[in-house]
Image: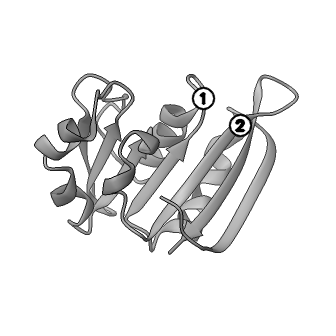
């Protein structure tokens, strides 16, 4: 998952109410990348970000973390299929292999991946990394978004 950063943007002290207004700019920054990796602590806002992104992309399905099923599939008229992964509960990378993760990742469809550190050998060289941290005000978040590869 280590690769060179080509560009990055960041936002500080963002409240959950402010997040929807930032999504269009973040999407515009990362829209050329099919693989979006989300890194944050448990409860850090990964699924909330993904839900807001899917709302912006006009997904009509309910967006929730696929913790137990590993992958949820959504449809958007803007980008067609979207695959939302949550690898928090996998025991090893073999589980990801068994669901055909490589086929998803190389499908040229938008793949939104929570807990990518659980499957490092499957992450393509080119991706968008969204790092989310709690700000000093615990009700707000800091976002660092970087293009890799």
User: Which residue is depicted at the point 86% across and 26% down?
Assistant: 137
Measured as percent of width and height from the top left, residue 97 is found at: 17, 46
User: Which residue is depicted at the point 58% across and 51% down?
Assistant: 130
Measured as percent of width and height from the top left, residue 146 is found at: 62, 63
* Label disc, if present, on residue 133 of the rendered structure: 2
Mark 1–mark 2 distance (CA, rounded to whole Å) = 8 Å
Q: Is residue 81 left or right of residue 138?
A: left
**Contact check, label 1 and label 2, Cβ < 8 Å:** yes
- Of residues 48 and 145, the one nearer the viewer is 145
Secondary element type, mark 1? loop
Q: Is residue 44 left or right of residue 15?
A: left
Measured as percent of width and height from the top left, residue 121 is found at: 34, 54
Residue 128 visible in the current orientation: yes
Mark 1 Cα shell of 10 Å, populated few (<14), some (14-19), many (≥20): few
Q: Which residue is mark 1?
A: 41
Secondary element type, mark 2? strand
Quarter residue 91 falls in:
top left
Quarter residue 73 falls in:
top left
State which tag comes first along the sequence, 1 or 2.
Answer: 1
* Label disc, if present, on residue 120 of the rendered structure: none
Considering every residue shown, the one lying at the far right of the view is: 136
User: Which residue is depicted at the point 16% across and 59% down?
Assistant: 103
Mark 2 Cα shell of 10 Å, populated few (<14), some (14-19), many (≥20): some
Residue 56 visible in the current orientation: no
User: Which residue is depicted at the point 51% across and 62% down?
Assistant: 128
């Amino acid at each position: 998952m280590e690769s060179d950063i080509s560009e990055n943007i960041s936002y500080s002290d963002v409240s959950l109410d402010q997040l929807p207004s930032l999504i269009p700019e973040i999407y515009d920054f990362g829209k050329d990348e099919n693989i979006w990796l989300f890194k944050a602590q448990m409860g850090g806002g990964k699924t909330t970000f993904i839900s807001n992104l899917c709302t912006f992309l006009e997904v009509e399905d309910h967006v929730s973390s696929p913790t137990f099923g590993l992958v949820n599939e959504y449809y958007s008229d803007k980008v067609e299929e979207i695959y939302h992964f949550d690898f928090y509960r996998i025991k090893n990378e073999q589980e990801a292999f068994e669901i055909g993760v490589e086929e998803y990742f190389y499908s040229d469809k938008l793949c939104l991946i929570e807990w990518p550190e659980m499957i490092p050998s499957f992450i393509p060289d080119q991706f968008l990394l969204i790092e989310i941290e709690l700000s000093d005000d615990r009700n707000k978040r800091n976002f660092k978004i970087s293009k890799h590869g």
